[in-house]
Amino acid sequence: MISFAIGALFSVTALLQATSEPFVKRFEPTPINFIMLSFLLFVIGVAGVLSRRNIIIIFMSIELILNAVNLNLIAFSRYLQLNQAAFAAKGLEVNHLSGQVFTIFVIVVAAAEAAVGLGIVISLFRNRETVAIDEIDLLKW
Amino acid sequence: MKLQGWEAVIFYVLAVMTLVMGVLVVTARVAVHSALFLISTLVNVALLFILLRSEFVAGVQILVYVGGVMVLFLFVIMLVQTRAEEESQVKLYTSQMGWAVGIAIMLALSVFFAIQPAQGAFRPPDSVVASQAASDSGNLTGQRSGAGSTSSDTQNVGEALYKQAALPFEIASLLLLVAIVGAVLLARGTKQEKLHD
């Protein structure tokens, strides 16, 4: 049912785009479609972080969120690369590669975060015999 | 940026696959299934990167995420006891489940309507559309185009990484070193601690 809603959202976006072009042209993806896709991926990750009990699945949801950010960065990098001439005509110097470089740093930080986070999960399980976050409430007042 | 012809079809296929697999990551009961769905999501995102002509980042995504991080996840799932969850003896979601889904839907709708006025902003002028093919062929090394030509994306990213982002690059290496030491310190048991003291 959720995938149904997502599909409907995509088709509505496409239908609401400008009407002067031929019918098929309306469905060609623009940066807006990439923003929508990465945003929906982000929302799925946020819902996972907020609702799941298993701390490992929460880590996986964080990876989903970071991937949504990466997708957005790469989409805008491509957009800047294709419109470099138009930006230069307006006197704007853009460097489209910074999006890709930033994505690589995000991946590095995600890998470090996963290593440390999973180490914490291991030592937590050794001490408390659980990975359910609502049973780990030592700091809760 | 307009993806035309088959690229547009591939975009929609990959987008729907990514989102369905993402929903399955969050809703799967067995943690290993969740990890496998996450691998599928990450591969789909890597294919989207290739569609956006960022081949190097796509390769890094496959190598680091699917090859490294996911193996780490699978090992931790193996070490940690989740049998009670798999046999549906305990609940899967916290008590804030309703709130979480409500907030997610509200976020989705608000950004959806906030984006609507910006639809036209990303339509490039006609002259730029014509230069898309030229820009792509400028991205390729050699004179050939189409199948058999190689992209210079890796070279460009490498140059940008070492020339413009040299200091962040070194800081990232330090971060990885700290992460390695921290992970080892956190994960070792009391027996190993006694052995070294």
Image (cartoon, rainbow, N blue to C red):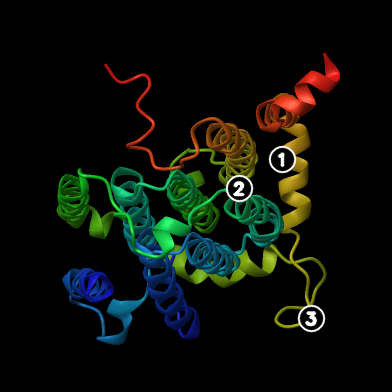
Does residue B24 appear in the picture of this structure? Answer: yes
Q: Position of residue A86 (x, y in %)?
A: 46, 52
In the picture, measured across the screen, residue A108 lies left or right of residue A124, that is: right
Residue assigned mark 3 = B148
Same subunit, labels 3 and 2: the answer reads: no
Query: What residue is at 63 percent from the left and 42 percent from the top?
Result: A111
Q: Are marks 1 and 2 in contact (CB under 8 Å)?
A: yes
Q: Position of residue A58 (x, y in %)?
A: 42, 46
Q: Give the mark nearer the N terminus: 1 vs 3.
A: 3
Q: Quadrant of the image for the C terminus of chain B?
A: top right
Q: Quadrant of the image for the N terminus of chain B?
A: bottom left
Q: Amino acid at mark 1?
A: Ala
Q: Is disc 2 surrounded by few (<14), some (14 to 19) or many (20+) residues within 10 Å?
A: many
Residue assigned mark 2 = A100
Nearer the observer: mark 1 or 2; the answer is 2
Secondary structure type for disc 1: helix
Q: Is B190 situated above or below B8?
A: above
Q: How far apart are labels 3 and 2 at the CA level? A: 24 Å
Query: What residue is at 65 percent from the left and 27 percent from the top?
Result: B186
Q: Position of residue B128 (x, y in %)?
A: 46, 63
Q: Are marks 1 and 3 in contact (CB under 8 Å)?
A: no
Residue assigned mark 1 = B160
Q: How far apart are labels 1 and 2 at the CA level? A: 9 Å
Secondary structure type for disc 2: helix
Please, which chain is the residue tagged with disc 2 on? A
